[in-house]
Each structure stands twice: as C-alpha cells, then as structure tokens.
Image (tube, grey):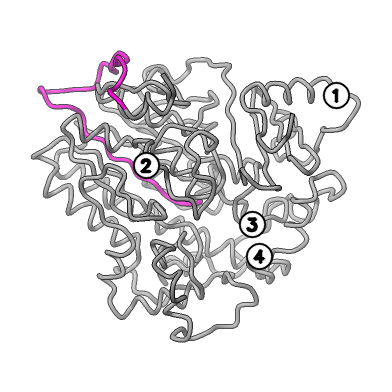
Amino acid sequence: MTRKQFLSTAAAKAAPALSLGQAGGRPKNVLFLLSDQHRPSSMSLLGDPYAKTPNLDALAREGVRFSNTYCTNPVCTPSRASILTGLYTHTHRTWNNTTPWPFEFKTMAHHFSRAGYISALIGKMHFVDAQTHGFDYRMDFNDWFQYLGPKTKLYAEELARANSGCGLPQIDDLWRDFGDPWLDAREKDDRKGFVHVGRASKIPERDHQESFVARESIRFLKRFGKQHPFFLISSYLKPHDPFMPASKWAKMYPAGSVELPDTWGKVNLDRVPKEIRGRIEVDRPTPELQEPEQARMRMRMYYGSVAQLDDAIGQVLRALRELDLEKDTVIIYSSDHGEMLGEHGLWNKFVFYEPSVGVPLIVKAPGAESGVCNALVSQTSLFATMLEMCGISVPGGLDGASLAPFVREPHRKSDAPVYSEYALNSKNARYMIRHGDWKYSFYVNDSAELYNLRDDPKEMNNLAGEASHREKEAEMKQRLFAWRRPAEIKA
C-alpha cells in the first residue's frame, strides 16, 4: 500500500493514548495557537532583551517547551501544509507559496471531524485555493476584510502590492484574470522596495487581524466549547510583515531602544553560499535595511508586533480559563517559521540558520508536568501528537512520530535527526539535516554549509570544505541523502 493510500483510507491502529486524553467521558479539546514568522528565541522567558511576551512565557512555564523545534520548510505555505498533514514537502508536494495543497493528503482536521469533533480554523492558513481541507468552521482573511469594510484600503496601503501571504488576495487565482483591483486605489508611500521598513499602523488596534482572530476565537469557544469537543486553530499573521503594529505597541520601542545583532556585518562572505552572500549584500524587498538606523527601526517594529501578538493570545487563553474549558483542553503554540531580523545581515526567512528554520513550540496538556524538552523535533510530529493526546487513531504513512512521550517525560532522550527543505523543483533547491550538535545544508547548485552548534551557536564558522572536517561533512551528506536524495541531482 502506498503512502497516498495510507492517508486517504481508514486510519491505522491507534497508538496508546496519553493517559490524560479524556476526563468525564468527553474527549480532550485542542486549542492550537499558531503565529507567522516568530523567531524561536524571541520570548522574554528565553532572555531576549527586547521581547515582551508575558502570556507565552506563562504558557511555557505551565507546559512543556520544546527548545529545538524545526519547521520543514522556511516559508509559509509548504510549512503549514507539513503541520496539517504530518508530511515533509517532498511528500505533500506543496512546493511553494503558489502551490495548492494536493487534495488527496488529508489534514488533521479531517481526522478530528471524523472522531466527532467540531474542527475550526480562524485566521491565516494560506491554502492558496478554495479547498477547506476538512474544517467544519472557517474564518479567514476574506472574513476579516468583510469586517473591515472601507478600512481594508488602509491594509492594502500597508502591503502596497498583491501578497497572498498577507491575505490580499486570499486566493491568487481571484486576481489572475484582471489584475490587482487596488493597483490605482492605494496612496503610495516613500518605501524604496516592495516591503516597508516598518511603522505604526494607521489601522485601529481593535481592527487588526490579531484582534479579529482573538475575538472570533473567543466567540467560537463561547458558542461551541461546552457543546462539543473541539479542535480550534487560532492563527495570527503577526509578527509577519508588514511590521506595522498598532500605535500602542509601536510606541513600546522608541528610537535607541534596540541594538543590531552582534553578527551584523561580520559574516565572511567568501565562506557562505552565493545565495546567502547575495541576500546579505542586497535586500531587494527592503533596500533601506543596509542603513543601520533603518535596520533598528525594523527590529523595533518586529518586537512591537510580537508584543501585540502575545496580547491577543493572552485574550484567548483568559477566555478559555474563564469558560472553564482549560482543564479539558490541550494547548499548543507554534509558528510556521522564524525570522532572521538582521542576524548575519539577513532579513525574512528562506534560509536554514536557526532564527529562520527554528520555531517556538509549547505544549500544555491537562495532567501533564511542565518542563523543557531539548530533543530535536520536527513540526511533522504535530499531527500525530494532537491525535494521540486526544485518543484518536493515528494514520500510517506520516513523516513525524508523536511527541506525546516527550510531553509525559520532557527529559526523554532522542538521537533522531530533523530535516528541512526549500525551493524544491527549482535550480535553487536546498536541503538541511540537523543531527546532534551538527547541521549540514546541501545546495544543489551552490556550496554547502556545515556548523557545530555547540561550539558555534551563531553559525558564523562554516566548516564545509575544510580538510579537518571532511569526514564529518561526508557523514552528514550521506545521512541527508539516505533520507532524501535531492531530486534535482540526476543519477
């Protein structure tokens, strides 16, 4: 039987449920809080001097924080497809942000619905086309725009271009025939590229996507929380660009309040792949970021966005508690990928350095102990984890095993590697493996990277190509190719 058949037919024999899966005869609920582009280290709990995240900090203290979690692809749509299907990119074939998710790969929403749950998605998921992928209840960007009414123009101006990653359009095909309807309706600003450095938003705070998602998530909990077991994804755009938090949050970080990363301007450009060198030398989306003061402004607005995100999440968590649902609910927080935020002189995601490919992950389960898990884990495991923790049969053919054993025992050891991929089916394809302290990145048409994260956590000393590390590089390459030989390499 093929993997496709496994995922499209009846579920395989269930794994043993986490002993905290049910109480009072009713299955556990799941609240999955998902953000976009949150750096794994940008929490005040972790010592980030600028992050203000009291609500996420509290959740991390009460649950299990996974300190070494990796997305499968450092860009929105492929990463989210992996989260919802439990598959790596080369399996689910959602190659990039314009590829519709293949219909035959069923999401965790299908499985929760079949088990009698009401499955809900409120906020961003970047589905690309009109498939609902198993959700019974769905509110996305178009519902937010309907709420905004004429204020949608303010958001169109913040984006300044068509950008489905930010929901305008929500579905690319809607604008393909006749072009961008906002093209001549926006008031232009002074940005040099197509992404603004960042500023305070002109949209009132109550109208931001985060406020809308929090409010509608709470409405869902009030309406359905007591009646049915639920699987709710409450999904926020921040801290993804536009880095334009509401005024209150933008003012938290005045000029002079942040400093550039200590890796800024210090990368040896002769020792990194041409792709990385090009991104450091020219940031096409935001050329202003070559100027230190503009770079600091972008950092300030990013951290304002993180603080606003944290506040919205706090509203949902308080409502869950006030509605007396917390004791019966598994709460999970993660993000689809990270953000470089000036590290190495890089911005955005798309690369395999820790701030980009790493993600935060917190799991709080009723009856489970709190702690920190340092094992290497992949977001492909979230699918099986949520099902097992609710006592639902886990299908065969998944690429990630359940993390429930680590929720039971956070200090549990694991020697399993994790992987990530980017730009598959293109001349710029690249693949990554992290195993133990070592990370190796293979670029199909570029030079490789090899880092020892214990000795070099900032990933500034590329050991690939050095005679003293030839054996380790060969070993890591062999491990990577044993998992997935790049399709772009012809035999």
Give the label, 3 or 1, closer to the camera: 1
Taking the spot 69% from the left edge, 63% from the top edge, the residue there is 283
In the image shown, does 488 or 150 lie closer to the viewer?
Answer: 488
Kindly identify which numbered label has been placed on residue 103.
2
The picture quadrant where one finds residue 50 is bottom right
Q: Which residue is mark 1?
A: 470
Cα–Cα span, label 2 and label 3: 33 Å
Q: Residues within 10 Å of mark 4 (few under 14, many from 20)?
A: many
Q: Which residue is mark 3?
A: 347
Of the residues shown, which amino acid type is indicated by label 2?
Answer: Phe
Give the mark nearest the N terminus, 4 or 2: 2
Give the mark nearest the N terminus, 2 or 1: 2
Q: Position of residue 449 (x, y in %)?
A: 76, 37
In the image shown, does 371 or 75 lie closer to the viewer?
Answer: 75
Kindly identify which numbered label has been placed on residue 295.
4
Please report the bounds of the magenta region as a residue range: 9-37
